[in-house]
Amino acid sequence: MPASTSETRRVAVLADSDTRWKWGALTARRLTTDESPLNGFLLRGRATPTPRQLDEVGVRADSLDEVTAVEFLRRMEQDADRYDVVVLALVGGAVQAMLHGLARAWQGRAKRPVVVTGYVGVVYEKLADGLLLRHGADLVLANSRHDAERFRAVYEGVDADASAVTECALPFLGGAPYEETHDPYTVVFAAQPSVPDTAADRAYLLERLVGHARLHPEREVLLKLRSKPGEHTTHIEEAPYQKLAQRIDGGLPANCRLVYGHMGEVLDRTDLLVTVSSTAALEALHRRIPTALLTDLGVREALGNHHFTGSGCLASWDQLDAGHLPKADEEWVARQGVAADGTYDTAFDTARARVTGLTGADRLPPLAPYYSLTTAPGYLPRILARHHLAPDGTPLPGAPAAGKEPGPVRQIVRRAARGAYRHGVQRVAPVIRRMGEL
């Protein structure tokens, strides 16, 4: 495969949800150029994004295919010469499975694509577990100086090579700096699918949002939702706000409504961003929009808002109702990769230079994840088996579509099965759990 320039570098992105497709596709663009060919692959599962969700991200791929893990690995084995960079925008276990599968698929090759992975947002839980599952990629992207330091410490703490850790920033920051010119004044609550995770806590937050709208009828109060009923995101949403809103006494006030769409477009008209711990908070802080991380349900690791301690942005609905506007701590913001000081344009320079150097090398070493049958013999086989891979990265007997492309009938059956699964997860499972609590 000839050495590539940034203008011609060809990229494959494998993603397993709408948010990870957003991160992976935009990361690919940051590492290359808008003109570089981008081929997208969606890992088949409960969170495979719908066309509407893909449109909302706003990144266009030259091709977009839905695949199983085994199908993707077969493509990468057959078409390794077509790609210079492969971005794995997946949950940690899936990244580990792909690293082992790709190591087998490219075994013996002097030239192979450069493999990049990372996190879609704030890393506030399972730090060691998630990082070690991502170890083995050529670049493990850290979204901030704070994350880069933590990532290296974890790898060095287990005697794993930490050289892949590369500091950059979230790829979807941007937009015009905040100006206090909106009429009406607009408050946006950025909802999360699984934080908080109980219907009671979610109903409480919705009631407080509605209460704020009634207390301030001169303001526009928006509930920004990630998905519509029936759609899935990275996390399962068992108590959608759309349903909870139907139970509000008297309905939503005239100045309060539900909105969808691109987060950046919503932030264009936002005067106060409110959330529990959504990555949207970092997008707002990047623009210097006043941002509040709610403390009503506590400051807890389970909620993720503990990540924002020291930010100056923790506040309760009572404080916001009374007119409080949080002011972000500049030092904290700088360490979190928000780049509100204007340095965002250079945030990906180091990562881009590393990719250029690796793609131009005559030979790349084989992929070598930290987890192996020597370091994790009781853990790794389970991780790989979830994706129908043996411990050596080869497809297990009976793996779906291991040797051929799925036919039209198989594709129709898959779509129907996935729809039934999503219905069961979102509609049936919560009912069964509630019955079990009686």
Image: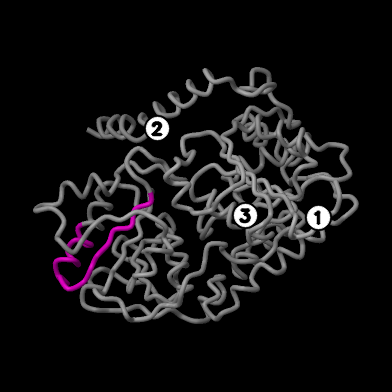
Q: Is residue 36 left or right of residue 45?
A: right
Say above or below: 109 vs 157: above
- Of callouts 3 and 2, which one flags the residue occurring earlier in the amino acid sequence? 3
Q: Is residue 319 visible?
A: no
Is residue 170 or residue 435 the one in the foreground? 170
Question: What residue is shown with label 3?
Answer: 118
Q: Which residues are magenta?
A: 207-226
What residue is shown at x 54% (from left), y 48% (from top)?
21
- Of callouts 1 and 2, which one flags the residue occurring earlier in the amino acid sequence? 1
What residue is shown at x 71% (from left), y 42% (from top)?
99
Residue 3 on the magenta segment = no
Question: What residue is shown with label 2?
Answer: 422
- Of callouts 1 and 3, which one flags the residue occurring earlier in the amino acid sequence? 1
Q: Secondary structure at mark 3?
A: strand
Q: Secondary structure at mark 1?
A: loop
Amino acid under disc 1: Ser
Q: How far across and down, in percent of the image, does residue 400 sit?
A: 61, 22
Is residue 198 or residue 242 the one in the foreground? 242
What whole-number distance in Å separates the C-alpha atoms at marks 3 and 2? 27 Å
Amino acid under disc 2: Arg
What residue is shown at x 9% (from left), y 53% (from top)?
250
Question: What residue is shown with label 1?
Answer: 4
Q: How far across and down, in percent of the image, does residue 358 sit?
A: 81, 56
**Residues at circles 1 and 2 in contact by the CB criterion of under 8 Å:** no
Q: Is residue 423 left or right of residue 120?
A: left
Label 3 crowd bin: few (<14), some (14–19), many (20+), radius 10 Å:
many
Q: Secondary structure at mark 2?
A: helix
- Where residue 264 sits, quadrant-wise, is bottom left
What residue is shown at x 27% (from left), y 62% (from top)?
222
What whole-number distance in Å separates the C-alpha atoms at marks 1 and 3? 23 Å
